[in-house]
Amino acid sequence: MAGKVDAICEAHGNNPGELINILHEAQHLMGYLPEEMQRLIAGKLNIPVSKVYGVVTFYAFFTMTAKGKYPISVCMGTACYVRGGEKLLDEFKRVLGIDVGETTPDGRFSLDCLRCVGACGLAPVVMIGDKVYGRLQPVDVRRILDDLDA
Amino acid sequence: MKILTIKDLDAVRSEAAKKLMLRELGERNINGDSSGLDTGTERMQVLVCGGTGCKASSSQLICDRLREKLKEKGICDRVDVITTGCFGFCEKGPVVKIIPDNTFYTQVTPDDAGDIVNDHIVSGRRVERLLYVDPKTGQSVSDSKHIDFYRKQKRVALRNCGFIDPENIEEYIARDGYSALAQCLIHRSPGEVIDEVTRSGLRGRGGGGFPTGVKWGFARKSISDEKYVVCNADEGDPGAFMDRSIMEGDPHSIVEAMAVCGYAIGSSKGLVYIRAEYPLAIHRLKTAIGQAREYGLLGDNILGSGFSFDIVIRYGAGAFVCGEETALIHSMEGKRGEPTMKPPFPAESGYLGKPTNVNNVETLANIPAILTKGAEWFSSIGTEKSKGTKVFALAGKINNVGLIEVPMGTTLREVIYDIGGGIKGGKKFKAVQTGGPSGGCLTEKHLDIPIDFDNLVAEGSMMGSGGMIVMDEDDCMVSVARFYLDFTVEESCGKCTPCRIGNKRLLETLNRITDGKGTEEDLKTLSTLGRVIKDTALCGLGQTSPNPVLSTLSHFYDEYLEHVRDHRCRAKQCKALLTYIINPTLCIGCHLCAKNCPADAIIGDVRKPHVINPDKCIKCGMCMARCRFKAISVS
């Protein structure tokens, strides 16, 4: 992994101004940015690791925990909210037994919120991986999870 | 092919225009007859919406199936299937349009491809079941021009969305694309370009509404060896998706406008700061930049004018505050997206300390149209102080969810009832929220106010980027205010105290109220604290963050009072204030509710009325959703 991180930093000229682009690519390697990886990047760019950590924790897109096999993102945009997005989220939390930002112990599902996929005509919307599920009701949640698991 | 002179550009345009002719004819088609290959039509085109909403409803598969069917019939060479940008009518997506008769099909599924090809394209008979049915008359409408949703719209920024193939530069050129750039480079001085934009009266579409020409003028005056043109494509307002649709449907208009801006302010470098959450828009923009370079419309010595310009893309990483221009600039520099005090304005010291001009996507999309058609044309549209059109993302409890563009000065009533088709399910209109987390709620009494920058601010809301969320009687205004505050608290960068701590206190107060623990004193706190935050926060995010609370407080004070005094939520949204009960005369004792209750709160013997134990009930509403006899109610 260290080699790949080095290569990414070098491709961006080890320029601290490119930190966000570097983090995007680095997160792609493992799906998240563990502490060790942040230390490597800080060393390579010759900046304090606190600066890297500061950027990672500032932006919602970067995460320090591994995502599940099926990453679930419930849209919490306004259009989805007024059409019942919050109830949908509650049902996912209840069925999976995890909170937002967590992953199930078996590593299958992780739960997150996102702000507007722009498919407001289909509200409320949930994204699982790259697939958008539209017009969902809390009663649909169990069926969708069962289908994924099958 | 490289376009080296204005003549080359004209040659490409007249060649490409032939291909678009069929669609232009379709736009003008008034006789309403349908056409087919067997009934004498030589060539046809099928336009399929490739916006994010329609893609989520498998519009790609529709394209594939259409091509398969055309191949089976051996008519591929006479019928083109073209993926376009968003048509705007997201409620009825996926949308498919047949050219030249301009037939507008809605809610198409991949299985419909066979009928579209066999019945319509070959035999010239419309597929009736896929036509839009006007809910008022019950009649089907075949041409989108005659659908209420489109009738009152005027498309300037969205002029090419749903019309051209966004991944084909020649289709853009055929629609007068890059002619504004060519005209500026060859015939106009930078000062004249800025003057034209200023005279048009165009104001920034990202939220603030600052005059674009004046902004360009500031950047032009700053003296520096290097200047930057930045396109702010960090569309963060949840529920607004116009910038994304423009980038997905007409990316070249952004590329062209940035180059024009570069010429006007004296910059050769452009940056687009775009959300990483918009993969399709990123792809289309990259494609457009690549094609523009290949055609010589970006790069060194464009059209032999001596002017050079190029664009790179920078990714956001999910931070609402980065829509604020100083925060955006820090983020592009690889730092935390924290805003700084203005002055110095970016026009003096921005990206890497150099003069920088930041414009929003929709603002830029207007530029080529203004320069081709003239400042007078643009300023003839709109109201006295807000010129041109505005794109709104219409969503929430409204029949026609979608993206619309109307002249400034159109009333909310026209937008919600004529274009939006009124409230879903025949419910009663309650409020419309404009301006996202920085805006406020407008009510019934505001419906006839002409929408423009200043009127919305005067009523305690704002234009913002153009999100418009419609709410009905089932929406609780206190919990809507709480929703927005929750958003701001999460997105606050934490740099200044009023925003970091003040908003947190506001949220806690709202939480107390929705939990049924609020007092009348809390309502006073909300209003005083809200004003303090407005007056003292550092950046635009903090200064506008209490707007959703203050505007609901002033327009829906009764509802707040009910929450704190009577512990009642009339919209039945605040869980802590609700009780679910089973009506013993309607309950037949089927036990379905008890089986589905996640908290085991429902007891009762089979075939006998059940009861809910209020101590165990978690108020999830699952029982009510499952009951087939409407025996469960909430109060």
Image (cartoon, coloured by chain):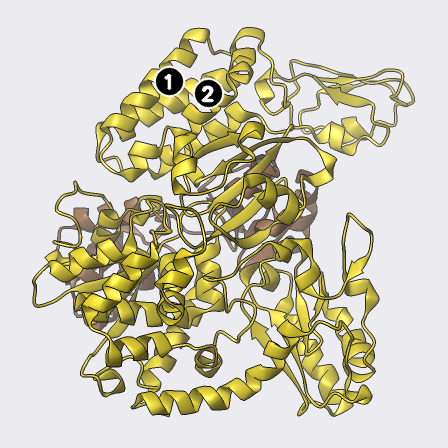
Chain colours: A brown, B yellow
Q: Position of residue B634 (x, y in %)?
A: 71, 20
Q: What element carries label 1?
A: helix
Q: Residue at x 19, y 58 (%)?
A: B217
Horizontal arrangement in the rendering, residue A143 relative to residue B234 (left or right): right
**How far apart are labels 1 and 2 at the CA level?**
8 Å
Q: Mark 1 points at which residue?
A: B527
Q: Is mark 2 on a helix, strand or loop?
A: helix
Q: Name the residue under label 2.
A: B553
Which image quarter: residue B220? Answer: bottom left
Q: Mark 1 lies on which chain?
A: B
Q: Which chain carries label 2?
A: B
Which image quarter: residue A8? Answer: bottom left
User: Which amino acid is tagged 1?
Assistant: Ser
**Numbered circles on residues, count:** 2
Q: Which of B137 and B403 is in front in this view?
A: B137
Circle 1/circle 2 CB separation < 8 Å: yes
